[in-house]
Every structure is written in C-alpha cells, then in structure tokens.
Amino acid sequence: MHKPLLIPTILSSTQHEALRDLELVDGTFPWIQIDVLDGTFAPNKSWYDAKIFQKQPFTSSIELDLMVQDPLKVIQQWLPVTNFKRAIWHIEAPVDHKKLIAFCRKHKREVGLSLAPSTDPRAILPYKDLIDEVMLLGVKPGWSGQTLLPTTIKKISVLKKIAPKLIIGFDGGVNEKNLSSLIKQGVKRLYAHHLIFG
C-alpha cells in the first residue's frame, strides 16, 4: 500500500533558480519533480537543461512533468541523468502514448499520464494497465501559486472507480488547507511548488 507522498515541484525560468531550489529540497524529499515547459501547454517556458543536471551531485529521485509537444525528445536528453526515474506527460500531447510508454519501460523508467482540468478522466482507460500513475492537474498548466479548481477534485472518485490500481497524483493548488482532504479522497502523490518554496 502506497503512503501519501509530498513531492516538491521545481518550476524555474533560469538555471540559477532551478539549482537553488534543487539544493533546498534535495535529500529532504525522496522525489523531486522538474516541470518542463516549452510554451505549448502554457504561455511560459522553463529551464531544464539535462546536461547541467547530470553534473549535479544530488540524491533525490527525479521525475519530469513534461508539458511539451515532444516528450520523447526531452526523455532522451534526460536518460543519462541517473537520478531520472519517472516521466509524466500530458495525455493531450499529440504523440503515440503506447509507443512512448514502451520506450520508457525499455529504459526502466516509471510512467505517468497527466490530465488537464478540462479533460475527461475516462481518457485514461486505454492506458490504465500500462502506466504507474495518473496525475490530475488542479489548475491550468504552467504557473505556480494558482487557486485549485473545485471541478478537478471530483475526478479523483471517478479515477478510483475506473482505474483502482493506479496511483493518483494531484498537481496544482495544493496547500495546507486542502492537503488532508486530498489524501482522504485517495491522492497518493501531492505535488507542490508554492506550498514548499513560497
């Protein structure tokens, strides 16, 4: 049985910010998420140079939240980073999800699919037995510090019914007031930037 886990998300526009935040949470949290934005799913872009991360002596496991058009390209860039253990990308991305899942499995990485606030949870059905996690976005992708959209919480119970074996993650709008409520409803991975770094 998986225990609930709080995972810091690093959403930085510069190398300095990203490495500063990484240093703050590395080793304290078992997992750290790097937000990867290329300007397609949100109007902003983030810094995520794999070659620089590869040189950093950090201990936490890394997962990528890939808010990009071409997740495969970024995953390939990150394969040499030994702490990179999990890739999550948007189900709305124009890619062959099954092919990309198979690529990640071949390279021994865990896999998750992310659902935007407007996406029906049933979109996960063709992949529910192939992935480790479904990550619900509680806000519009791209910016930290947003207020959680109440309609997204309703998706938790739907996912528990249609994919009871999947780990449910929740990203965006997570704060001290709703943390315990999300856990009670079945969320196992709670992603937060503003809660931790704010």
Image (tube, rainbow, N blue to C red):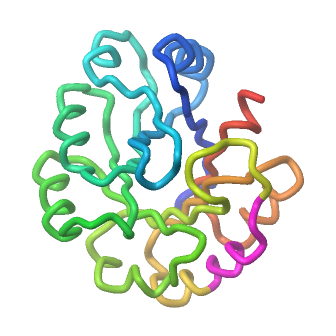
Q: Position of residue 40 (x, y in %)?
A: 41, 52
The image quarter in which residue 145 lies:
top right
Q: Position of residue 159 (x, y in %)?
A: 54, 81
Q: Position of residue 197 (x, y in %)?
A: 72, 27
Q: What residue lies at 56% left-to-right and 54% top-to-bottom?
A: 141
Q: What residue lies at 54% left-to-right and 27% top-to-bottom?
A: 12
Q: Does residue 151 show up magenta in the picture?
A: yes
**Closest to the observer: 198 or 94?**
94
For this view, does 79 lie left or right of residue 118?
left
Above or below — where is 120 with respect to 86? below
Count of picture labels: 0
Figure quadrant of the C terminus: top right
Q: Which region shows up in magenta? A: 148-157
**Closest to the observer: 41 or 106?**
41
Give the residue furthest to the front.
43
The image quarter in which residue 4 lies:
bottom right
Give the residue furthest to the right.
177
Q: Does residue 91 show up magenta in the picture?
A: no
Mostly what secondary structure, the magenta segment? helix
Q: What residue lies at 19% left-to-right and 43% top-to-bottom?
A: 73
Q: Position of residue 11 (x, y in %)?
A: 55, 33
